[in-house]
Image (tube, rainbow, N blue to C red):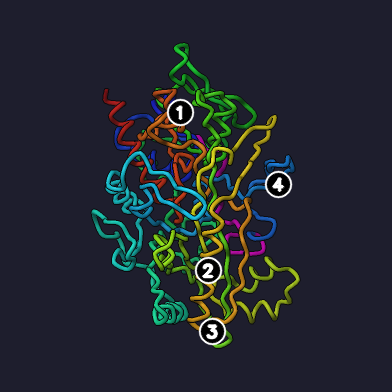
Amino acid sequence: MFDGPDIVIIGSGMGGASLAAGLAPTGARITILERGYPIPDDAPARDPWRIYTNSAFRSKETWLDETGRPFEPGNYYNVGGNSKLYGAVLIRYREADFKAMEHHDGVSPAWPFAYDELKPWYDKAEQLYQVRGDVASDRTEPAHGAPYPFPPVPDEPAIADARARLERVGVPPFTLPLGVDIDRWLSAGQSGWDGYPDQRCGKMDAETCGLAAALAHDNVQLITGAKVKNLKIGRDNRRIAEVVYEKGGEEHTLKPDFFAVCAGAVQSAALLLRSGLANSTDQVGRHFMNHNATAMIAIDPRFKNDAVYQKTFGINEWYLSDGNGGKPLGNVQLLGRVTPDILKIQVPQLPMPAARWISGHALDLYLISEDLPDPESRVTLSGDKIQLRWRRSNMTAHKKLVSKTRKALRAAGFPVALARLFDGRVPSHQCGTVRLGDDPASSVLDPECRSWDHPNLFVTDAGALPTSAAVNPALTVAALALRASNTITKDLAA
């Protein structure tokens, strides 16, 4: 361990790991504080009964809902953060997502910069996370400065058949950009990767890509089991002076020149609230967003689904409009394979023979609609507890997306399409609580992800996102973090 870091990064998820990867070549001394530990090699990583029931990986902490009742959030605290169990969909926000966009139930505001500003950082993020994809497969795909680093993960035969069915009825799927080396993944076990924890066996996540690139430099260190308690302001009442964390029952203090909070949208907001920082305009914790999301199982007795991983295509036909010149609805993508065990876990009253039959004749999908920013949808503190008051928005669009998808699937030969709306305990797309913007009255960060209040404080996790769009946020978080690393590099040289 070295003393006296120049930069402390709090959290090793997609934002923290990508920021570290971007900063590591500067030679600056970087310390990453992570409250969790690496997922061990002998963990039950492919056991759905250990993952989808009383998860062997999820934290046991509780938060409070808007009524004050405790609940267990689906958050993970380990090296690599939530990305260890993510679906590895590394998709860019669409170009239109950076502009003001009118939805059925409100307006998604414009970002303080256009897509072209982030385009080169998306290119770098795709290289860092070794994305597999096909730029030409999606008509909504924004311009790239370079092709994907690798060809796409191939459809399995059953999924190729489903893709062809949809194409025949005028709803052409696109190839999902994925961070998975499928041969390595399957060599470690015949299962999908969506929702399963990676043990450094083929999934491109914050640990295996961003953090690995950073730790290849001897000026970067990772401290695990380090739970950050607070940040403290300096004598000038502007710059952050120190971070206090607890490890092994002992309290430690670090006093770097720069601080980056990357603990996840909820935890980053909670840390800043607990520390009384970056909140001169009462914006920290506000504008919490968490996609409106539905799982759908489409059943056809003639369809035989023997796929292992399944998750290789999506549908963006209703992303920019409803297909008839109306307002946007959202994105559809395949879920990882819903096996009989997973189906039984989700619907306990379902007999196992029925679960096997349904799973063997079903296509599993994930429908996402944009959640619009609302200042009253927020993270607050109640004593030592996090309280999450999520106000759903834009449900008109989401209901229309469910209806459009069901209609398309029926036309493609799937007569039954069952749907279930996810609730707020699903954490994978939380964002917006420490939003960037061009007006300090309505944002916490400037367009460079720097705190308006504290010039040496940055936030580069999903909390910085000013809008949720209707696609997975991981790649956008990585691109923002790499862009912020460029800003901090300039500050280091000043």
Residue 212 seen in the figure: no
The residue identified by callout 3 is 304
Position in image of residue 449 (x %, y %): 39, 34
Any magenta on residue 223?
no
Name the residue type under label 2: Leu
Labelled pair 4, 1 in contact (Cβ < 8 Å): no
Position in image of residue 175 (x %, y %): 38, 68
Of the numbered discs 4 and 3, the one sitting upstream in the chain is 4
Q: Nearer the viewer, residue 319 or 480?
A: 319
Q: Nearer the viewer, mark 1 or mark 2?
A: 1
Q: Which residues are magenta?
A: 33-50
Position in image of residue 466 (x %, y %): 44, 42
Name the residue type under label 3: Lys
Of the numbered discs 2 and 4, the one sitting upstream in the chain is 4
Question: What residue appears at the point 67 percent right and 66 percent down from the top-left corner?
Answer: 346
Q: Is residue 192 left or right of residue 44?
A: left
Mark 4 and mark 1: Cα distance apart in space: 32 Å
Of the numbered discs 4 and 1, the one sitting upstream in the chain is 4
Q: Nearer the viewer, mark 4 or mark 1?
A: 1
The residue identified by callout 1 is 441
Q: In the current view of this chain or complex, which residue is farthest to the bottom?
A: 302
